[in-house]
Amino acid sequence: MERFSNLLDDLYFTNSSRAKESILADYLRSAPDPDRGWALAAIGGTLTFDLFKRNLARTLMTERMDPELFALSYDYVGELSETIALAWPVSDNPKRLNRLPSLSEIINEFNSRGKLGIRDYLIELLDAMTPPQRWALLKLGTRGLRIGMSARSVKRTLANMKNVELDVIEELWHGVSPPYQELFEWIDDRAPMPDISKRLTYSPVMLAHPIDVEKDFSRIAPHSHQAEWKWDGIRVQIAANASDVKIFSRKGDDISHSFPDLVEAVDFDAVIDGELLISRDGEIGSFNDLQQRLNKKKPTKALVQKLPAHVIAYDILREGNTNLRPLPLSQRREALKTFIDPRDPGRFSLSRVLPFETHADLSALRQKAADTGGLMEGLMIKNLSSDYVSGRPKHAWYKWKCDPHLLDAVLMYAQRGHGKRSSYYSDYTFGLWAGDGQLLPIGKAYFGFTDEELKQLDTWIRNHKQQRFGPVQEVEKELVFEVAFDSAQTSSRHKSGYALRFPRISRIRWDKPAAEANQLEDLAQLVDRKRN
Amino acid sequence: MTDVSPESWMQVRPEGLYCKPADAFVDPHRPVGRAIVTHGHADHARSGHETVFATAETVAIMRTRYTDDAVTGAQPMTYGERKDLGNGVTLWLAPAGHILGSAQAVIEFGGRRIVISGDYKRHFDPTCAPFELVPCDVFVTEATFALPVFSHPPIEHEMAKLMRSMASLPDRTHLVGVYALGKCQRVMAALREAGYPHPFFLHGALVRLTQLYEGLGYDFGSWQEVSKIDRSDRDQFRGRVVLCPPSALADRWSRSLPDPLPIMASGWMQIRARARQRRAEMALIVSDHADWADLLETARETGAGDVWITHGRVEALEHALKQQGIRAKALDLVGREEEPE
């Protein structure tokens, strides 16, 4: 564990990616199995389980420390794991350990214990550790490790260690799993390359560029491009063969367990790219509906029945043993059509191709998308000759999102940010005026402003403090934000009754008196108008 | 019988803490007639006061930082020397252990004693007189690091870390960001104690104050100013310590050094994100302030029934002291920097 903690510290404090990669490579070459495999998984973000619940660490802390002092510390540090790592009050009679267990010993021990055992073990370790070691443990245990190293950089490290192209690792990556013993045996020249041909793996997806209307429109024509709706769901890749089905998120996370209804409906041997949404009797549900099913490891039957999952397919990457990725979109589209046609229409549908002749037609379609009240985010415009490649090739796929809505809202609460922004109040909750002259919060945003504006906002907040609720700082209701958002929906989870999609700060209205900010009624009208 | 409750004769004014019967301010942040200055850091020692009561070292520091005539009416004092401020007020200074010349202002009036700590620390520091505990009725404390997350390691521990790094990365210039007054000299002295044998290389902004220390008898061994060394000779910096102000760490200036490793030495370095904000690649936790345990312990040891808190993480200290049965309150002083050091 000491080595792992030192490794994280070295990586954390190193600026250049190249230097980080060389530090990681040194560690991976010299650390023993299976420790190095677990370390790789922790850094590469591929661990599939928590060692303990994030809340356990917090609970232990509140049992041992004055809650007010803990709240102030957390507020100041801005990050839970580090707050606990630094302020952990060691037990009165800590259990003495001859040595810290190794990384894999720690993982095995947590996995073998029940709830109470996990609690005791966590206390034992925290008592025996230095603050940096505690930080490493807490980050590892709750899979919250962020040390400024991308998955791509981790893979590049492996590629350099083995002296192969990055693509080789990219293809292997989703076919191997922690603690990566077979991968390291190959890297160490002790075994051949792992054979992953029978495993269902994630293929990195093809992405679109936001359209630049002035430059890109001239490239777009009806004979060379197809337009489709851009739905507001989540991008998924369904990979299936005779024996297994996997649903991957856009980042390659396996989310099959959250969608057993969809998994059940898969009866094919293919890889499909599409949008996951909720659909009841042919009617597409809002993102809010979908959200209730995301991150549910074991959804209840009732929930699955109430909110059935559906995929609007827009591409096909493999059918049987045939790799379709090198084909142009026009041919893949034909294959997809034939493929989807016989499927259960409740679970799978084909993304519609929208007819257009002129750019004005495209604009009209985009307006139509905007009028769906957030069901659609806009248009996708794809070059018919494009083959399917991972990443974001130029001029192949465009996305044309609807213009955001704007409202003037009043800043109500601020919270310190995380990581590099932990010393600044950088998370803002804002509200609109209700009929009775009261402000009701409608959303939270933490981007859309420059670093310079962040400093100004931070200063403003420090000078306009009111009450504090744990880490949440209430401020005088005097500052107006012009808030941009993609859509708004009714929501029972918020006191105001509304939830915004993708809210961000579009402008800070230093000049505008708070009384002149928008009314909640304005938002209500926007939602109503959309619905009709 | 006049009212001698501490609040009646020691008040918060826009200029700073004010001793009414003596007509004197403590560390006022704008020019006043009579100022008691606890130490030479800029947010405590402003220029332009008519009369300054401070240690001789603090006066020397002020004269170095400002101009000679910025401190015209100086009344240099030694630790323990009693001064009659008139109207029955007596002032004396006790070492605060913060930096060279730093003092606690001990003010006595009507049989009561208020101690204004200024900034202080209780960790070892060979570049200033160690903190002296003065029992009192009211203890006015700082709260710069007043959170349970702050527990400062011994400086030897941090210097050992730096020495190890120089051994393992002998090609990189170890560029250490330090504040010019106090931190710079303390780090040099601590490195000498750790056995660092080579000359130090100093950024020009650190030279004058270091010379001031030397003039007062402190010895840091040999050192050279970076700008006096020809560019072609700068390879000698590799694996060695170059000291600069924090602002120069990521500045153009540092580009003239061979493969610099930016290191920051400060009490804030305990918080990872702070170190990253500075783009430091190594963090040395070197604080010239009391940490959480020392702040609580010291307030208790003074036996003061009232503790007034001037600046820093005020709420946490107030809360914790109240829990120990001490009457604690925050003084709303303006003009202190959010993060001095």
Image (cartoon, rainbow, N blue to C red):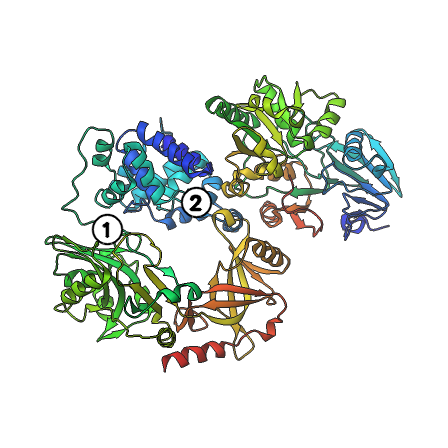
Q: Label 2, on which residue? A: A81
Relative horizontal placement of residue A417, taking residue A226 as reference (left or right): right
Quadrant showing the N terminus of chain A: top left
Quadrant showing the C terminus of chain A: bottom left
Q: Secondary structure at mark 2?
A: helix
Residue furthest toward the right?
B86
Place residue A131 in its image quadrant.
top left
Q: Are marks 1 and 2 on the same chain?
A: yes
Residue B180 visible in image = yes
- Vertical comparison of A196 with A431: above or below: above
Distance Cα–Cα, label 1 vs label 2:
31 Å
Place residue A385 in its image quadrant.
bottom left
Residue B246 in picture, x, y percent from top left: 61, 37
Q: Label 1, on which residue? A: A202
- What residue is shown at x 49% (from left), y 24% (from top)? B171
Residue furthest toward the bottom?
A532
Residue A361 in picture, x, y percent from top left: 35, 76
